[in-house]
Image (cartoon, rainbow, N blue to C red):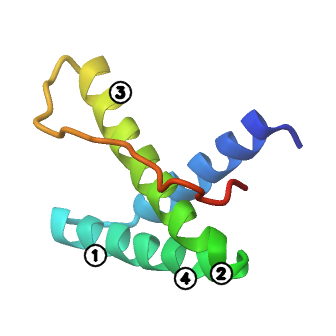
Amino acid sequence: MTRNEQAQHVTEKLLEATSVCQSMGELADMLMAIGYTLGSLTCEFEKEHRAHMVMQICEMVGNGLMATSQSMGDSTDLEMVIGHREGQAQI
């Protein structure tokens, strides 16, 4: 499976999982559970890579928000400053 196919598969599964939410509160709870699970999964990486993975996940969440808002014709007030620690281990 290519990277794009993997991304499409994950997107479909997340949309399927969130489609059962019947309110914005339920959707928020589901998104928080997904976030918690993503954080937990970073423990699969070596200790020196975990913080970097969390930063990358947060960056991708912000990028998704900004790209989707823009495609919907909405603006977003999210501002991201992306930085990396000097000497940070790269995966």
Q: Amino acid at mark 3?
A: Ala
Identify the residue shown where x is 70% and y is 48%: 9
How far apart are the two marked residues, 3 and 1, measured between alpha carbons? 23 Å
Q: Secondary structure at mark 4?
A: helix
Give the residue at mark 2. Answer: 47
Identify the residue shown where x is 61% and y is 75%: 42
Image quadrant in which you'd find residue 77: top left
How far apart are the two marked residues, 3 and 4, measured between alpha carbons? 26 Å
Identify the residue shown where x is 17% and y is 70%: 25
Q: Secondary structure at mark 1?
A: helix
The percent coordinates of residue 45 (x first, y second) are 71, 75
Quadrant the N terminus occupies:
top right
Looking at the image, the residue that sits furthest to the front is: 86
How far apart are the two marked residues, 1 and 2, measured between alpha carbons? 28 Å
Give the residue at mark 3. Answer: 67
How far apart are the two marked residues, 3 and 2, measured between alpha carbons? 31 Å
Q: Amino acid at mark 2?
A: Lys
In the rendered image of this protein, does residue 89 appear above or below residue 5?
A: below
Front residue of 35/13: it is 35
Mark 1 touches mark 2? (CB < 8 Å)? no
Give the residue at mark 1. Answer: 29
